[in-house]
């Protein structure tokens, strides 16, 4: 009884208090750690690769800000939680009730006001970035994007040419006007951080400015049917002069009927341009699609598919009205029904003779 080292008059060591000196030191340490870690997370955001568009850089700023704020909140909340669990845990065999707590007005005002302010700040910051990445600039280049099951088509109205991949000039803003020919798709270039729904009944827009030359994947980000995962293309960011060359090449190729020797090349090109390769395997066109029947050797078997129908008629019918004959093991209504309208007669002839020649 004579030895009671530190507790003046108490019978045992005092129970830890929520706001005693130790807790205050701990609170300061947790608070400072959360701010330092939050700043580090925001500055060196380890979750993102480098974006390659002007809009992406701005979007990444928002993301880094959010990551920084989230890190502060996470370290603060979890730090206080772990500290409390360790320091205020009951002694073994202590089955008594905890202290009744009435609340702490100052604390409650703080933890309402600070998050409200933080969320308001993030909202204003995000809104400004959103307004910025949607802002038109005079003379921006327009590309019309058509999404369909399961391919992308990029139409350049100024040159009246189209392509199955998107080419854009380095450092210049491009306006994409997008529409779907069937169901809802979503245009997504991860490297640009740009994702926008593409709808059948309404035009949607996205603006992109490539800042690093290169080739980046274009994906569909809306589950749109059996070929959703195959609905890919690419965007090429290149210096303006190169882009103009490429466009001139498309213009030159458009008017010309292919020479006899080029028929195969032209057919192969159409096979890719109309995205047949997304669904069908055809070695000659380096196509590996798995959704529709294999087309290797189609020229040999097409003649015996339907009694009384020539090989050429069978191939033509299968392109224009694909539901007429469904190969065993495959489903109707998967292949688009509108190739007859989308292809010119000449294109259809070229594609049919190309496929006929696949022996
Ligand atoms: Cu189009 Cu998914």
Image (tube, grey):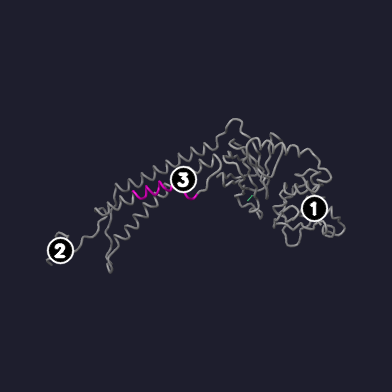
Q: Main secondary structure of the magenta part?
A: helix
x and y percent of residue 29 in the render? 31, 51
Q: Nearer the viewer, residue 155 or 98?
A: 155
Residue 24 placement, left or right of 354? left
What SS does tag 3 mark? helix
Describe the element under mark 1 as helix, strand or loop. helix
**Mark sitting earlier along the chain (1/2):** 2
User: Which residue does the numbered mark 3 point to in the structure image?
Assistant: 64
Q: Earlier in the sequence, mark 3 or mark 1?
A: 3
Q: Find the residue positioned furthest to the bottom.
A: 93
Q: Is mark 1 within 8 Å of ligand 1?
A: no
Spatial CA distance of label 1 from label 2 is 98 Å
The part of the image, by quadrant, that contains residue 359 is bottom right
What residue appears at the point 30 percent right and 53 percent down from the top-left corner?
26
* Residues rendered magenta in the picture: 32-47
Query: How packed is label 3: few (under 14 Cα within 10 Å), some, or many (20 or more)?
Result: many
Q: Relative to residue 60, is residue 346 drawn left or right?
A: right
Q: Is residue 31 magenta?
A: no
Residue designated by label 2:
4
Q: Secondary structure at mark 2?
A: loop
Q: Quadrant of the N terminus?
A: bottom left
Return the residue nearer the eye: 181 or 42.
42
Task: Give 113 or 146, whichever is nearer the viewer.
Answer: 146
Question: Residue 290: percent from the left, percent from the top?
Answer: 69, 58
Residue at the extreme left of the image, as rendered? 2
How far across and how far down the image is residue 24, in percent? 27, 51
Give the residue drawn at x 52%, y 36%: 132
Name the spot of residue 179 as percent of width and height, x first.
65, 42
Classed neighbour count for the residue bearing mark 1: other residues with Cα under 10 Å, few (<14), some (14–19), many (≥20): many
Q: Which residue is mark 1?
A: 355
């Amino acid at each position: 009884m004579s030895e009671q080292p530190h507790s003046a008059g108490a019978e045992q060591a005092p129970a830890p208090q929520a706001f005693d000196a130790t807790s205050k030191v701990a609170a300061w340490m947790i608070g400072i750690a959360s701010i330092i870690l939050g700043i580090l997370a925001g500055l060196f955001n380890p979750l993102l690769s480098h974006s390659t568009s002007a809009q992406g850089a701005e979007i990444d700023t928002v993301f880094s800000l959010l990551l920084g704020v989230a890190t502060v909140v996470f370290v603060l909340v979890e730090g206080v939680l772990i500290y409390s669990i360790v320091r205020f845990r009951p002694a073994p065999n202590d089955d008594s009730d905890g202290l009744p707590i009435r609340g702490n007005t100052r604390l409650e005002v703080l933890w309402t006001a600070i998050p409200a302010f933080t969320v308001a700040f993030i909202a204003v910051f995000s809104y400004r970035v959103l307004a910025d990445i949607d802002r038109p600039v005079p003379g921006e280049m327009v590309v019309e994007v058509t999404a369909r099951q399961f391919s992308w088509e990029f139409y350049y109205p100024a040159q009246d040419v189209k392509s199955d991949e998107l080419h854009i000039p380095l450092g210049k803003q491009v306006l994409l006007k997008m529409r779907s020919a069937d169901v809802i798709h979503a245009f997504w270039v991860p490297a640009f951080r740009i994702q926008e729904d593409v709808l059948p009944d309404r035009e949607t827009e996205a603006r992109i400015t490539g800042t690093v030359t290169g080739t980046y994947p274009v994906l569909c980000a809306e589950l749109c049917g059996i070929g959703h995962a195959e609905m890919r293309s690419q965007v090429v960011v290149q210096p303006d002069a190169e882009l103009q060359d490429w466009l001139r090449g498309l213009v030159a190729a458009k008017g010309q009927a292919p020479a006899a020797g080029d028929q195969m090349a032209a057919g192969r090109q159409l096979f890719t341009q109309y995205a047949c390769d997304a669904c069908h395997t055809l070695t000659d066109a380096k196509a590996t699609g798995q959704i529709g029947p294999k087309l290797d050797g189609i020229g040999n078997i097409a003649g015996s598919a339907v009694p009384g129908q020539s090989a050429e008629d069978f191939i033509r019918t299968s392109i224009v009205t694909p539901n007429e004959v469904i190969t065993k093991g495959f489903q109707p209504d998967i292949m688009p029904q509108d190739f007859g309208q989308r292809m010119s007669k000449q294109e259809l002839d070229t594609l049919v003779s190309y496929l006929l020649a696949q022996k």
